[in-house]
Image (cartoon, grey):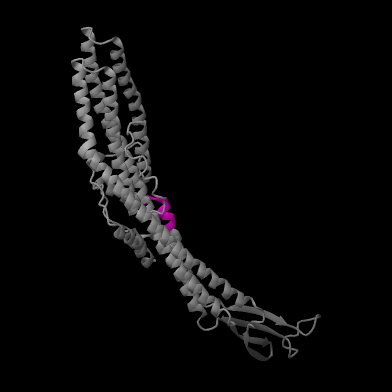
Amino acid sequence: MRRLLALALALAACPAAALDDPALATAVREALDRSPEVARIRAEVAAESQRAPQVGAFPDPTLTLGIQNDSFNQINIGVMETSFWQVMVTQPIPWPGKRDARAAAAQAQATAAGARLGRAQLDVEAAVTSAWVELLLVRGQLTLLGKLEALWREAEALVRARYGIGAVPQSDLVRAQLELTRLATQRLGLEASARARTQELNRWRGHPLDEPVEMARPLAEADLPDLPTPERAVADAEERSPDLAAARLAEAAAGRRVEVAQRDRYPDLAVGAAVMFRGSLDPMWAATVSVGLPVFSKRGAAVTETTERRKAESEGVEAVARVVRLRAAERQTALSSVLATLKLYREGLLVQSDAAVRATMAQYRVGKVPFASVLESVRGLVADEGGFLDTQAQAQRVAIAARAVSLDPAGGLAAGLGGGGIP
């Protein structure tokens, strides 16, 4: 069992997360310690580890008690020489090597089951980290919403001042107030989403659902994941994938079952010893040796069956390996695209969008542009700031999938980059 747990921990070992937050590390540890999903699989693995001692043990002996009597009218033990009480013990003896082969097959199966524990641990870590990222995203959107509210209040004050001197129509003031009202409705939705994300995270941690979650750094300030080379991304995935390890271990277990089937072609033995008590007459004894007669063809079919199943497991290893390599390549491509997009946001879009808003409001202040231009520039800022947050979250999602060595398609990870972050 200790070896199986070591295997699971080795499979679960992964590169450091870009989200360098001690509170997140604590949340992951709590989830792993308290997860019923992990505990269930750990118990199943422990149960599997107890099969080898069972199948590798000798069969239990059989105790037979009997009576042989020469008459239906009376008990003739002690009177007739062929009447007696009998005590007999029979011990089945598997053909040499069968017990070891069965124990090895059971141990191989238990080791294969141990890979499931590694997968469960990685899944829990990914779920907790994903919930953390989604909560960071919603909180970032709330922060952005506050910035937009301040910007629209500034715009409303500007419109009110110009409306007071008759420089703009009343419709400009109404539209500015309308935007503030829309932001208020969006805040309600984001606050509800933040509460739902908090509850999801606390469910994984095993904490009260509405317990506040403290986070050290906002999403916009989180370190970005490192971009591995395509070769390194694939090699890392193949090395750490619990699914690929499970497939390889299942192939090894199938090979052990072939050995068992091959040895099962040989008959088992049984030895017995009996003592017959005849009352006043001298007791008798008997010794027996029996052997099974392999007169039917089922053993050959069993060898063929297990051999074909081993071939199937071998093909399964290659199938899983191909998916692992594909997903690693997809994530590497997606992360490269995401990081390039973030660079554009940081070095161009965000600065230019903010400057456009300031310039448009300055021009509106002196009557050079209509209020529609202010609306357009502010909405552009909303899209860019929200897109930046979304892309930050996408980078973390790709990194989470890479750490979990997920087999899920990565196509949707890089889709929709640059979308608005405010619902």
Q: Main secondary structure of the magenta part?
A: helix
Is residue 362 positioned above or below 75 on the image? above
Residue 194 visible at all = yes
Name the residue: 20% across, 12% down. Answer: 161
| Residue 173, quarter of the rendered image | top left
Name the residue: 37% across, 47% down. Answer: 127
Locate the C terminus and report the quarter of the image it occupies.
top left
Front-most of 116 and 421? 421
Would residue 43 be found to the left or right of residue 366 on screen? Answer: right
Name the residue: 61% across, 74% down. Answer: 301
Front-most of 21 and 275? 21
Would residue 36 be found to the left or right of residue 102 on screen? Answer: left
Highlighted magenta segment, given as a residue range: 32-41
Is residue 147 positioned above or below 24 on the image? above
Outermost residue on the right side: it is 73
Is residue 193 positioned above or below 55 on the image? above
Percent from the top left, x then y, of residue 253?
Answer: 47, 70
Percent from the top left, x then y, of residue 257?
Answer: 51, 73
Percent from the top left, x then y, of residue 147?
Answer: 24, 28
